[in-house]
Image: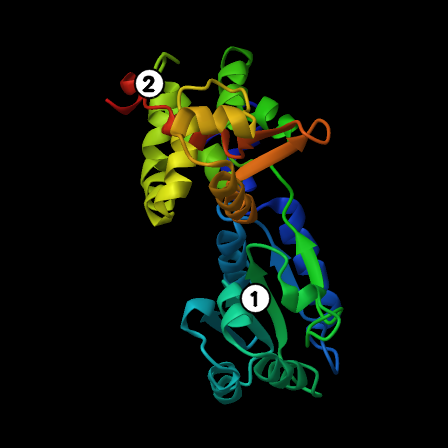
Amino acid sequence: MDNTLGSIPLSSLVVNVDIFNTVRLEIANSANTVVPQPVVVVGEEGSGKSTLLRRLYALYGEYRHVWIDGRYIFDTEYIIERCNPAGGTLLFIDNMDFYLTRCSYDEQFRLRRFLYNEGAPMLIGTVSKVLPAFTQYEAPFFEGLKLVYVKPVPDEDLRALFNDAEYDRAASLMALVPPTIHSLQLIWDIIKLHDSPDNDIRRLLSFFSGKYWNIYQSLPANSQHILNAFGGNGSSGMTIPEIRNRNGLSTSVLTAYIKSLRTAGIINVEKLGKRNSIYTVKDPLFRIWLDKSTPELFA
């Protein structure tokens, strides 16, 4: 399939050129210094972080470098052992979230001491969100890392990638999903492979329905009751009494389980006054998935 349209190639977005160049500059300025500055790229799932890191890894063949997938890290010793034999100048850790959430602050202080020794490798890592390990004052890496943020896909990239006839179609689909490179690639495929927009939402749902089913199935029954109430409600939010009328749960139960859904980032609330709070499903495509009154979307 042709991977260019308009004035820029889709492949250039996959590596997130601005962030790519930012990290390259950090490597150029820091990699061979006495104590190099660690860099961590922050971006939500599907934003192209792993692709970016792989491109950087391949680019610096002249450097001694080490690659570690964070899913396999359960202690700091694993990182040190991988680095010492190679004497790595660059240490790439993808999915570093796993290490930072699994390992104690004592373990993380050990990593910090290792990275801040003379001759240590320069760390370039990726995480999906800003973690307490970066924000808590007592955390080992509080102000100890340079964070580089992957920006959402901007509207000008949509306009550059899609022609005038396709732009509105692409924009309407992007409004339903996270503004990431992964989302853009899915929408690219839908539009390039199908001339008609009639089934665009159904096609988009096919990529996310498994994820939504797993989220829904993992929730307690009362949380599922609450989410069911949003199905068939259009794009409008609902108050506690309206949700209660749909599922019959008591106000006390509703309040407790809505709080947990808000904490999980599934439901949003807009306060319109002391007694008037409007609740909505945060993810618009998830709300559509919940809407079983439109079975044609799931055919």
Kind of residue at disc 2: Ser
Sooner in the amino-acid sequence: mark 1 or mark 2: 1
> In this rendering, does residue 1 appear at all?
no
Q: Position of residue 288 (x, y in %)?
A: 41, 25
Q: Quadrant of the N terminus?
A: top left
Amino acid at the residue labelled 1 = Tyr
> At x 56% / y 60%, what residue is drawn?
126
In the depicted view, which residue is nearer to us: 5 or 158? Answer: 158
**7 to the left or right of 205:** right
Does residue 89 appear left or right of residue 75 in this picture? Answer: right
Q: Nearer the viewer, residue 217 or 143?
A: 217
Q: Quadrant of residue 278?
A: top right
Residue nearer the viewer, 105 or 169: 105
Quickly name the residue at label 1.
60
Q: Nearer the viewer, residue 247 or 142?
A: 247
Q: Is residue 237 visible?
A: yes
- Return the x and y of residue 275 as percentages of the image width and height: 67, 29
Q: Quadrant of residue 248?
A: top left
Indicate whether 119 appears above or below 33: below
Compared with 40, 118 (above or below) is: below
Image mark for residue 293: 2
Secondary structure at badge 1 equals loop
> Crowding near pointer 1: few (<14 within 10 Å), some, many (20+)?
few
Q: Residue furthest left?
A: 299
* Image point (34%, 23%), residue name: 202
Q: Could you tell me which residue is drawn at 39 percent across and 29 percent down?
A: 247
Q: Residue 20: image x %, image y %?
A: 62, 52
What x and y, as percent, mark residue 99? 51, 71
Foreground mark, 1 or 2, reads: 2
